[in-house]
Amino acid sequence: MRSQQKEIFGIAILALALLACLISTATSSSLPAHTVNDFWDNGKGTNFAYFIVADKSLTEEDANRLISYYQDRRPGYKIMNIWIFCDDTYADEKYLNDNSVSDDQFFSHVMYWSLSGEWTNVGTSLQTKADNDLPTFRSACK
C-alpha cells in the first residue's frame, strides 16, 4: 500500500511540474511575435533598457503587453526604457550614443517608446506618434 501511495505522490508531483512549465511557457508564448535585439543593464539592478524588434503591424495594445512583460521581469527598477522598432536598423544599444546617427534617424525606426520609473522626470511615458520633440517618430515604419 505504501509503495502505491509513493507512486501516486510521484505522479502528482510530475503532473504539477508539467503544469507549471505549461503555464510559464504560455505567458511568453502568448506575446506578439518579436525579438529582443539588445538589452542593457547598469549592473546595479536599477536601470534597464530593451531594444525590441516587432512587425510594423504591432498595435498599441500589443506593445503595452510587451512592455508590461519586460517591466515585470525587472522588479525594483528605477529607470526602464523599452524601444520597440519596426526593423533592426538601429535596434541596438550602440546607436544610443552614436554621434553618426541623429535622433531623427534613430526614432524614425521606433514604433513605441516606453520610459518609466521613479528616477525619470516623467514617471511613466509611452510615445506612440510623432510630436514637436520627435517629428520623425515611426516615419520609417510606414
Image (cartoon, rainbow, N blue to C red):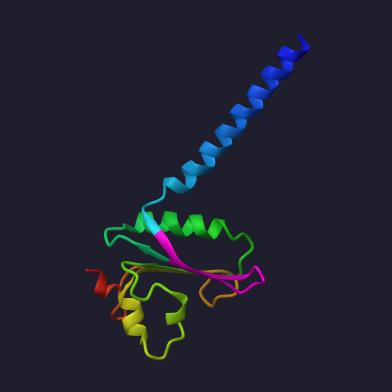
Using the rendered image of the protein, determine whether residue 62 is visible from the camera's viewpoint: yes
Quarter holding the N terminus is: top right
Give x and y (percent) for residue 122. 51, 74
Residue at x-position 55% and y-position 38%: 21
**Farthest residue, direction front:** 3
**Farthest residue, direction right:** 2
Residue at x-position 39% and y-position 72%: 91
**Farthest residue, direction bottom:** 99
Using the rendered image of the protein, determine whether residue 132 is visible from the camera's viewpoint: no
Quarter holding the C terminus is: bottom left
**Relative horizontal placement of residue 53, taking residue 19 as reference (left or right):** left
Q: Can residue 38 be found in the magenta stretch?
A: yes
Give x and y (percent) for residue 68. 49, 56
Q: Which of the 4 quarters of the picture holds residue 114? A: bottom left
The image shows residue 32, relative to residue 25, as above or below, that is below
Q: Nearer the viewer, residue 78 or 110?
A: 110
Residue at x-position 57% and y-position 57%: 73
**Relative horizontal placement of residue 123, taking residue 101 as reference (left or right):** right
- Number of marks in the rendered image: 0
The image shows residue 121, relative to residue 64, as above or below, that is below
Most frequent secondary structure within the magenta stretch: strand
Q: Which of the 4 quarters of the picture holds residue 100? A: bottom left
Q: Can residue 45 be found in the magenta stretch?
A: yes
Residue at x-position 31% and y-position 67%: 86
**Relative horizontal placement of residue 13, taking residue 137 as reference (left or right):** right
Q: Which residues are magenta?
A: 35-51
**Farthest residue, direction left:** 142
Give x and y (percent) for residue 94. 46, 80
Q: Nearer the viewer, residue 33 or 124?
A: 33
Give x and y (percent) for residue 78. 61, 70
